[in-house]
Image (tube, coloured by chain):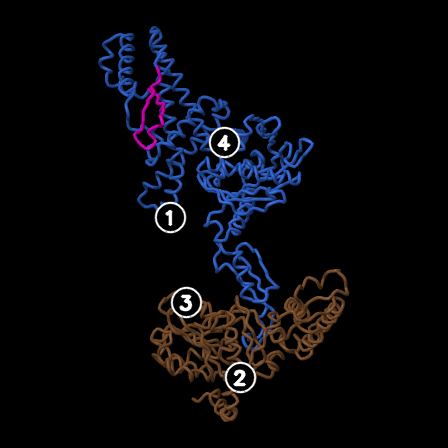
Amino acid sequence: MFPSLWCYFNIKTQYSCIFLFLLKHHTRLLHILLAKTENLFKRITMSKRAAFCKSKLYEFHSHFFNRPIIVYRPPQHRRIHLLTAKTLFRRLYSARAALSQSQPQLSNDLINIMEQKLSAIENRHAQLEAILNQPDASPEEYSTANKELKKLRHTIDVVSELRKKQQEIGGIKSLIDEAEEDKDMREMAADELGQASQEEERLRYMLLKSLLPKDDVDERDCILEVRAGTGGEEASLFVMDIFKMYEKYSQNKGWRFEVLGVAESDVKGYKEASAAISGADVYGKLKFESGIHRVQRVPMTEKSGRVHTSAVSVVILPQADQVDVQIRNEDLKIDTYRSGGSGGQSVNTTDSAVRITHMPTGLVVAIQDERSQHQARNLICTLFDNKAKALKVLCAKLYELERTRLDANRSKLRTEQIGSGDRSERIRTYNFPQGRVTDHRVGITSHAIDDIMEGEDLDTFVDALILQQEMDAIASFTST
Amino acid sequence: MKSSRASLFSILQPVFSLRRPAFCSAAAAPPKPQTPLHLRPPAFRATLSDLNRWHAWAKTQASSVGSTFSALDGGPDSSLLLRELNWLVEDAFEHPALLSTESNASAEVAIKARLEEMYELWRQRIEERRPFQYVVGCEYWRDLILSVEEGVLIPRPETETIVDLVDRAVKADSELREGLWADLGTGSGALAIAVARVLGGGGRVLAVDLSPVAAAVARYNVERYCLEGRVSVRLGSWFDPLKDVEGELSGVVSNPPYIPNRDIHSLQAEVSRHEPILALDGGADGMDDLIHLCNGAASMLKPRGFFAFETNGEMQSKLVVDYLQNEMKGSFCRLEIVSDFAGIQRFVTGYKA
């Protein structure tokens, strides 16, 4: 009966061409109106009251409709001041998408578990607030409490919103009980209740997502490595195709794609190729690309027109930040094999062997046969030079090593994650004769193989895989 | 304190004076430096089977050494000698890879020395303990390949650090980069050449050596690196040939003789039997030339000029710093002892006050 209030607006910015739809539930407004006109309402009949509300709301609606307005942000976004229209759009779009299709119905068990966790969080929050308000708290206590509070703030904002919503639902329910004889009012309230419950559901889902363990490297840049597997020259041609696919995909995403190295094969394909990709959420989007990609097509080199099957392997490694793996001169232990005796003029040897140890990791590089010690040292130091591209890969590998070590002790999330990081697994098939691409993990087939190879339609898989990961995480959340 | 180097020079002076006419006439033709083996033309031929026989013999020779040399005086062991043999092959052969192939044994290949000379060179290396660098006529030092021969000290890897110290100094004070530098006792010219390359186009280096052979080799190396315009080699004792630039030098570097007199004969055979004693013997406690250098640097350097000297390490570095601080109070500042890559306090650096 009551239409949802849609604020339709047009931001006068460089994105002025983007129309933004903002869904805003009207319940709060209704309450304000009701409160302000309470006395008035007491003197008029229920049906008149409903009609009054209706007319007020339409008035409000037309007031906003077709007007450029200030961006209205839901309360939990209030502290983010630097939202660009683009991210706002994305956020709303995805929120809407989540509402309309992907939002799973949360089971009662899950809601119960969540309620427990939420009250635990609320208690903790209250404790922390208390610590901050204590005048005799030590500076250490104060700062740790402050840090923890900051982490909790987002969740707490959503929780309080959820609590308000729950109160509201309670209010509406009692309104329904009151208004037994007024059919009009009941209908109105029921409609209201539906909307509020939906909103409650959305908030719960948001909370659930924020409670799930996060892979904190999702925002990282990544290193892409593609290698030819079975299938010889045809595989190397496909390495080139798939490498270019990721390049185009990155361009479409506005990411930076920096080729680190390409080893060409005899037929001008790539035996292997690597690149550093940087931008927003690169690793989070691409991490599921790791694995064996199978291709079925008639190779250019094939004369009889027979379809060949070959495979390439793709590896996506999160790029280490400079802070994670930083090679400092102090960390390098340089051993030379002429430290015996007093050295200098007293000794004449052609032994210029040098061994450099990276102390924190125990990584050792040694060079024996270089004729000048300086050259030997330089050669090694290039390996350790953190500006060198080689090191970028080394860093990523060291970082991955470290992460795997840490992850072994962590929740099952990562092992249950799609692809499970096992790089021998066949994850996707590109069938050119049939013009399809199938991802075996989510069981999705796209028939737009050309668009995918142009880096256009890869999101079909990326989004599905991310969604699947969320679902799996929810499943593991319930089981723990 | 009169340096023994100076006294040695005064003893030798009559000898030099006597021979002066010869040197004068030789002014047009100074001692001719030898060409390093790898730069010689592949003018000789030998069959692969002969060369393989030589190679097998040389390997046996190297292996038979075992660790006797290293036990005796810290000399090379078999594994080191075998590596040197590989390098000799690299330098002497036009196509070193041929040696290991199974191709026609009677085929002739081009080499840069006669087969007999190849035998002789390796015999000298093993039996006479002739330094490998003299055998092939060159030393790989930093990123340079320097020609060396008897009579010229083979530059040591420790000395490479001085170049880094100079690099650090000119990066800290760009005025030094444009200045005039001196390398005293330049030997093969290693420091002078490397310093000139660090300075780039702006600076100039004067390379000084008492030995005419060293001066000739240094000149040859300077030419090979096309630095004639920026490095000039002067013949003479320490600061003597630099009277015209007194108080104008931006930097002084030196790897002077610093081995105490009594230690020389117990050194590794390669050093004591073959390298020029003139470049090694630093007097009774090895300090004679260092002290002479300290005194000279005080008058030759301009204010804020930089110096870096190599020492025998540890105690000697401390003695040099003591001398600079006490005997030459106020002449220098920011004195520092720098360790070499083996952790031995090897270098003394500082600035003219």
Q: Residues within 10 Å of mark 2 (few under 14, many from 20)?
A: some
Give the chain letter at badge 4: A
Residue B203, position as x, y percentages in the image: 40, 70
Q: Which mark is residue B278?
A: 2
Q: Secondary structure at mark 3?
A: loop
Q: Secondary structure at mark 2?
A: helix
Q: Residues within 10 Å of mark 4 (few under 14, many from 20)?
A: many
- Residue type at mark 4 is Glu
- Residue type at mark 3 is Gly
Give the chain letter at badge 3: B
Residue linked to disc 3: B201
**Residue at the (38%, 37%) spot, across then down:** A127
The range drawn in magenta is A3-26
Label pair 3/4, CB-CB below 8 angstroms: no
Residue linked to disc 1: A140
Looking at the rendered structure, whether the residues under marks 2 and 1 are on a common chain is answered as no
Q: Taking B132 as reference, is A387 above or below it?
A: above
Residue linked to disc 4: A456
